[in-house]
Amino acid sequence: MGIRYHDLEIELDRCCCGEPEIRVLESTFNRPRARFELTDAQGKALATKVEEFESLLIQGEEHSSRRRQLAEEIGTELYRTLLPGEIGRTFERCHAALRPSEGLRLRLSFGHEYDHLLGGLPWELLCDPEKHRFIGAEQQTPVVRYLDLAEKIEPLDLTSRLKVLGFIASPDPETSTRYRYSKIDAAEHRAILEEAIDPALRIQRRFIPRKHGKTKHKATLAALREELYDAKEADAPYHVLHFVGHGGFNEDGEGALFFERDDGTEHLVTGGELARRLTKDVRLVVLASCSTGKIPRLRRDGRNPFAGVASALVAAGVPAVVAMQFGVSEDAAKAFVAPFYVALHRGQPIDVAVTRGRLAIEDRGEEGALEWATPVLFLRSPDGVILRVQEEEAPARSVAIYNTLDLGKDKLEHVDFEVDLIDYFEDRWIHNRADWNGAVYDELRHTLVERIPKQSPIHLELAAPLSVAFTTGFLLPVNERRPITVGQRGKPWSFESDPPPGAPFWLDEQKTRELTPPNFPLTADSNDVVVVVEALRTVLGKVAVYLEHSDLEAPPPRVGRLVYVRLDRPGQEALLSGAHARVLAEELVNRIETAILDRPETTVHLFLACPNGLALAIGRLSRTLRRIQLYEFDFEGKRHGTYEPSITLVPPRMGEAP
């Protein structure tokens, strides 16, 4: 099963007042903005380091230490520049919320009103300064360049085999009077592509120049155009153009590819010129050529964001281009190709395929160290899907979760899955507290995570304690992006769209401070945080009494900080819809995250007085809250007439099951 990616799109541009700005355009959570701070002096110093890094990249092992040092220095500065303050925290939240087999696509775009030279920086080297890890080198966090232009790109629905045209250009360097380059062994590179693009993958491949036949043997621009259009007319178009050859810059400073002429001399072709020869069926161009991923400086008009070969192709309508931002060794190019096409054949998004190729370069050890950062992906497809195989839509599933017979299950005409908790409870009170993190959690996880397909929409009917509703949301986090509805007061609540007009929101923090008793039991030396939510009834006094108890079987926790939210008029009718619950949950989680930001090893003690739909919505956003302890109130007085710990939840780390 492939990785399912969520998007974090960050744009560098200017705000309406003309100031440089970084803004999050898309994320699972919030969309903060921050001032962009990279002075001219810092930019020049960074550019100098990048030039030195490139000069050492494909040199011998004696330069490995300096290469690594430069890569970490460049990557750390780019990380701090791109992910300051709240933007960095949003990245961390999105990453922490990932489930196993999920990833976070870091999509970078550069607005038209900003310095386009930024697009030429090696953002693939982003390096976490604390963990010393390169973001773009990990399969879970691909870094892509995204051009959000006016014409939107739709995936091509494939009904036949994927067709790749390998184009190997090798002009004679002895005939050149302007440029210095080496002769390319076309036969060797053809053999590499033939081995990498295995026919067993159900990928059809052809090459220019051909070994045999009447077709021109030179890799000319005319030969490329004729091949593409002949295939189009035969209703067998090419989907991928794989160019092998030299890349560089023409006399005007524009990025160009070294094609051949009929006489064997070089013909420099810019990205724009190449784009005009491509058919609309070409969804991907792979440029196995040095410097094709660079954005050069033009002599005539300063900086042009589309003067590079790759950026010009994407601007002209090609959905995706893989190019090289530095010089690339032949060994690195060989290592990249096979895993790249294997992933593409399996229907993976293009950024997944590129990441597989990068990892293959890195797997070569010190010989390939840091060359993984050379391939650059330019995208116009927001989700990386450029070729699509139609799949049947997953059917919706109904789930009844209940610990009593008179609610929940009987409200559904058809039940696909049941979570029957009756044997563990007497009314709403659990028989054995160990069952919260034992049988109850196991029953919920078995159904929600293991039995229901991840793609299926879910409708829930809940007739169970708030801790069960919260845990249900915890096991169905918001970053899964599957449609979920929940039955609430006889109506299905959806968490999409916007709250209805007039929906009440939490009182501001100043007001809740005024409503908090001055003697609320907090302990200065505790890192734990207590969270009290009042949407149905007021319970803050009951929570204070519980925290002061000393004669309970399970002693109450010691807490150092209070997060208290309440509606102005708590009650059954206060929550108006699922969308209303979602917005309230988002605001609550933001307040909790602020409270625990400076508190390592924090436990969040959660006391809820709200409908199950709101508890579910809070649970779906709770993966960033570290350790969570929930509580239930003994309304029937079956034990002690106060609160008691229920379930304990610890958000999974990357790669762990929930």
Image (cartoon, grey):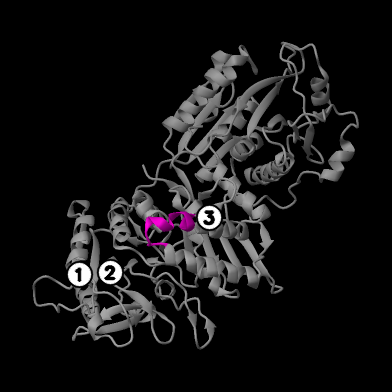
Query: Callout 1: few (<14), some (14-19), or many (20+) C-alpha neighbours within 10 Å?
Result: some
Which is nearer the N-term, disc 1 or disc 3? Answer: 3
Which of disc 2 and disc 1 is earlier in sequence?
Answer: 1
Q: Nearer the viewer, residue 473 or 185?
A: 185
**Residue displayed at 33% across by 63% down:** 329
Read off the residue under disc 2. Answer: 244
Q: Examine the rendering and report whether any part of residue 625 can be seen.
A: yes
Residue 186 vertical position relative to residue 125 in the rendered view, above or below? below
The disc, 2 or 3, on the residue closer to the chain's N-terminal end is 3
Residue bearing mark 1: 186
Residue bounds of the magenta highlight: 57-68
Question: Outermost residue, left direction?
Answer: 213
- Horizontal placement of 67 versus 30: left or right? left
Which quadrant would residue 331 be assigned to in this image? bottom left
Q: Is residue 550 left or right of residue 261?
A: right
Pinpoint residue 312: horizontal percent, then vertical percent: 42, 76
Q: Is residue 261 above or below residue 377?
A: below
Which residue has dot 3 on it? 72
Residue, x 32% and y 56% (percent of image)?
Answer: 336
Q: CA distance from mark 1 to mark 3?
A: 36 Å
Q: Are marks 1 and 2 in contact (CB under 8 Å)?
A: yes
